[in-house]
Amino acid sequence: MPVGAADAARLLEQATFGVTASDIAHVQSIGVDAYINEQLAYPPTQYTGYTYTPNTKPASCVDDGSVPLDASSWCARDQYSPFNVQRDFFTHALNNPDQLRQRVAFALSQIMVVSSVDINEAYGLAAYENVLLRDALGNYRALLQDVTLSSTMGRYLDMANSDKTNYQYGTIPNQNYAREVLQLFSIGLVALNPDGTPQLDAGGAPQPTFDTATINGFSSVFTGWTYPPLPGANSQWQNPVNLGGTMVAFPDHHEPGAKGLLNGYTVPANQTPAQDLSDALDNIFNHPNVGPFISQQLIQHLVTSNPSPAYVARVAAIFANNGQGVRGDLSAVVRAILTDTEARGAAPATNLFGHVREPVLFITSVLRSLGGQSDGVLARTSSSAMGEPVFSPDTVFNYYPPTYTIPGTQTVAPELEIDNAATALARANFIDTLIMQGGAAPDPTVPRSTGTTVDLTALASAGNHTALIARLNQMLLHGSLTNDASNIILTAAGSIAASSTDPLAAQRAATYLVLTSAQYQVER
């Protein structure tokens, strides 16, 4: 079936970090299914160039702005902060071909959270994001295992070095990871119907998915794991902090008894740490909540904050069975999300369809649609000012909860939880810097810095101001700008151009007004 330009642009908004004219033409040429196939086939572009650094920052690792710069000039910033990982995130998002994988991995990073608030080492953050990139379009069961055994996650949620009960030494299993893998990474707090709605008891109350005894069972399962040994070192219980690989097991520190898990299942006594882990993750993976719980959040991140129960049910059914008897196939789930009848078409399915552009997507969409280039410095600073510092949420609960509703309504709008006067002004300031001020200059403290710019000269070829507004409407809003908004922008652009000596004054004004409009803030 032929794909219209508007539907192609909507698909690209959902599946990439920003719409480009060439990608629209490509989708129209090969079709939606072929485009998704193409994206699924791309190998992951990962974070490279990061190496182990000791957990305790050496006294010699400081930031020194003296000239000339060398690798040690900004040691503290580059090795013990998220600075370069955040920059790499934006350069990947703007330039890499595996756009769909990068988008899904970013969504997963907001579900299975690790934060630089607690993980200072850049190499550890990069290693964890590589896990998500590798598994983003694979099977959820493999993702669950790799996240569980990630040494970065082990440090963040305290599974690393969690020891069996020993009253003599005062040790008990740590419960942090056990609680969050259930509450946030897999099944949630209440039992769900296949369409994501809560199951209610006879009194109309939601039914909890687990209790304290379940947490105790899982926390016992997750004992006996420590960091991988450093190269050349002998492995021992409580290896030094090493965030560059998969945790290793020590049976002598693993809780030996039987462990009660979900839905009445009990792990047998005296199994190895690996056997207990496998049984426990299978127990989670096969819980009926996982499909609707994970599917609904992926729909929210990629397509719409308010999917209908029927939309969630259709996607959750694919999670349960991809059509070939395979459960947890994330490629099939993502395909189902993007090709669903509610997602496709030239116009949104309902008035509530779509979602607010979270700061990261706002920044990348602007830059990609306008053909901008960036070294990531302005983007990382701006996303933080807008309330979404990449890979640095304050807690394991992400920057905003998936259930946040607009006050006084029942409309779910997660991204609006971080919307306030300061973050709204930061959006406008970013556009002002980029469009009205000509972008950001190269950062002298960053090797090979290019700054951040867009070139608006191509817009000068529009024959008149009316044609300019029409072109921006197609480029940025796939033709959905209202007539009233178009007329207001047209008048403003003409007035500014008449009083300015800047040959691109009209182009700057019109682009600024479109990008700061309320309509652009909501992707529909």
Image (cartoon, grey):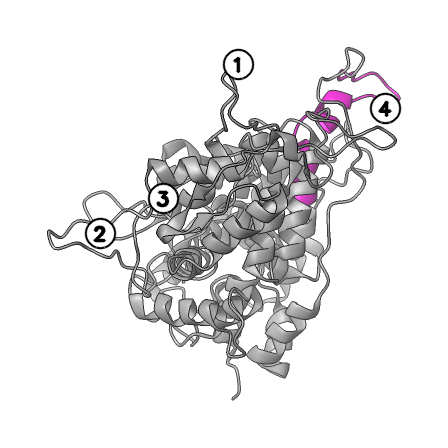
> Callout 3, which amino acid?
Leu
- Spatial distance from mark 3 to mark 1, Cα to Cα? 50 Å
**Residue receiving disc 3:** 416
**Residue receiving disc 1:** 168
> Callout 1, which amino acid?
Gln
* Label 4 Cα neighbours within 10 Å, binned few <14 / some 14-19 / many ≥20: some
Q: Are marks 3 and 4 in contact (CB under 8 Å)?
A: no
Q: Please name the residue shown 47% across and 32% down the image.
A: 176
**Residue receiving disc 4:** 69
> Callout 4, which amino acid?
Leu
Query: Which SS class for mark 1?
Result: loop
> Callout 2, which amino acid?
Gln
Eye-nearest disc, 4 or 1: 1
Q: Please name the residue shown 27% across and 46% down the image.
A: 406
**Position above or below: 487 against 273:** below
Q: Position of residue 490 (x, y in %)?
A: 43, 59
**Could you tell me if residue 185 is visible in this image?**
yes
Eye-nearest disc, 1 or 2: 1
* Label 1 Cα neighbours within 10 Å, binned few <14 / some 14-19 / many ≥20: few
Eye-nearest disc, 3 or 2: 2
Asked whether 262 or 351 is in front, the reply is 262
Q: Are marks 3 and 2 in contact (CB under 8 Å)?
A: no
Quarter of the image for residue 346 reads: bottom left
- Spatial distance from mark 3 to mark 2, Cα to Cα? 13 Å
Q: Earlier in the sequence, mark 3 or mark 4?
A: 4
- Spatial distance from mark 4 to mark 1, Cα to Cα? 53 Å
Eye-nearest disc, 4 or 2: 2
